[in-house]
Amino acid sequence: MSQSPASAELIVKDLTIRFGGLTAVEGMTFEVNRGEVLSLIGPNGAGKTSAFNAITGYIQANGGSMTYQGTLLNGLKPNQIAELGLVRTFQKTSVFMGQTVLDNVLHGLHLVSKQRPLAIIFGLPSVAREEMELAAEAHRILGFVGLSGRADWAASSLPYGELRLLEVAIALAAKPKLLLLDEPVSGMNPSETASFMKILAEIRKLDITVLLVEHDMKMVMGVSDRVVCLNQGKIIANGSPAEIQGNPEVIRAYLGERYVRAQG
Ligand SMILES: Nc1ncnc2c1ncn2[C@@H]1O[C@H](COP(=O)(O)OP(=O)(O)O)[C@@H](O)[C@H]1O
Ligand SMILES: [Mg+2]
């Protein structure tokens, strides 16, 4: 058996996912190394979200294994996987629309808070102290994603781009070691996308590994250390952004035949 590099944080081996007769992902093998930004790209329906769902426990894999820092993820529930440090955002929103922006982040923080249930029931002073600390932490996270001025807004009143930033804030509240982002800038305008790229650069500095599913090629090429390209459930390329950009099979699959003809 070949030895994985010591820096591999997540190892996905021969992952296969089926929906009835449809094979959405087939024999997918790749690794995410500690501290890198790895982008998973590919045309619509390539299997990117399905792979995310399997890695984070939202669907069961039909074959293969997923190992995070030596722990087998197969069969674990989403909350167990999140506790290991794999935290995701959704392609569709996970925000509680009826709550304020701050409460959404506080809710995320409470999920990982160490406070003992009995202390909470009896309202011990340590609870009040912890509440203040959590509120400060929530404000800090909101500041980090550029939503400081929105803390008291109802989540439902946020413009779309800011709602996507709130999702990232909620994910950060869960203290990720590996953050999985599924099309974080979809629906954002160019200036929102540019701010998001800056936030992503800041996230890296926090020593958080990032697995990104993204359509926006400019963003992918700008932020990724490595890119894995999926087409019809199979990996067709794995390399640096420059290698991927120049790979004819990727260009055919992802950018379309027309692009190849125009270049060639
Ligand atoms: N819950 C599901 N039930 C049946 N088919 C699904 C389901 N989720 C995804 N698929 C199918 O699996 C394939 C891969 O989808 P998906 O993983 O969402 O691709 P991507 O995120 O790359 O666009 C598609 O053909 C899609 O229609
Ligand atoms: Mg998808």
Image: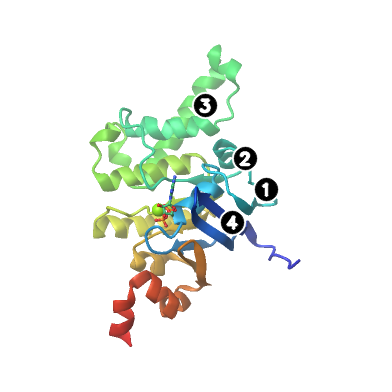
Identify the residue position indicated by label 1 in the image.
72
Q: In which quarter of the image is residue 220?
A: bottom left
Element class at badge 4:
strand
- Tag 1: residue type? Leu
How many neighbours does mark 3 have within 10 angstroms: few (below 14), some (14-19), or many (20 or more)? some
Disc number lying in front (3 or 2): 2
Q: Position of residue 127 (x, y in %)?
A: 53, 21
How far separated are the C-alphas under marks 2 and 1?
8 Å
Of residue 35 and residue 132, the one placed in the foreground of this image is 35
Give me the C-alpha separation between circle 2 and circle 4. Answer: 15 Å
Q: Mark 2 points at which residue?
A: 76
**Residue at (35, 32) in percent of width and height:** 96
Asked if the beta carbon under badge 2 is closer than 8 A to the nearest atom of ligand 1, the reply is no
Do callouts 2 and 1 mark residues in contact (Cβ within 8 Å)? Answer: yes
Q: Mark 3 = which residue? A: 130
Disc 1 to disc 3: CB gap under 8 Å: no
Query: Measured along the vertical axis of the image, is residue 1 above or below residue 45?
Result: below
Please state the horizontal and vertical placement of residue 113, each as a whole percent of the image: 55, 31
How crowded pointer 2 is (Cα within 10 Å; few <14, some 14-19, many 20+) is rated as some
Task: Say which amino acid is labelled 4.
Answer: Leu
Residue 43, position in %: x, y?
Answer: 38, 63
The nearer-to-camera label among 2 and 4 is 4
Q: In this view, does 193 lie to the left or right of 26?
A: left
> Which residue occupies 46% across, 56% down?
48
Residue type at mark 3?
Answer: Glu
Picture coordinates of residue 93, whole percent (x, y): 36, 41
In the orientation shown, which residue stands out farthest toward the right? 1
Q: Closer to the N terminus: mark 2 or mark 4?
A: 4
- Identify the disc placed on residue 15: 4
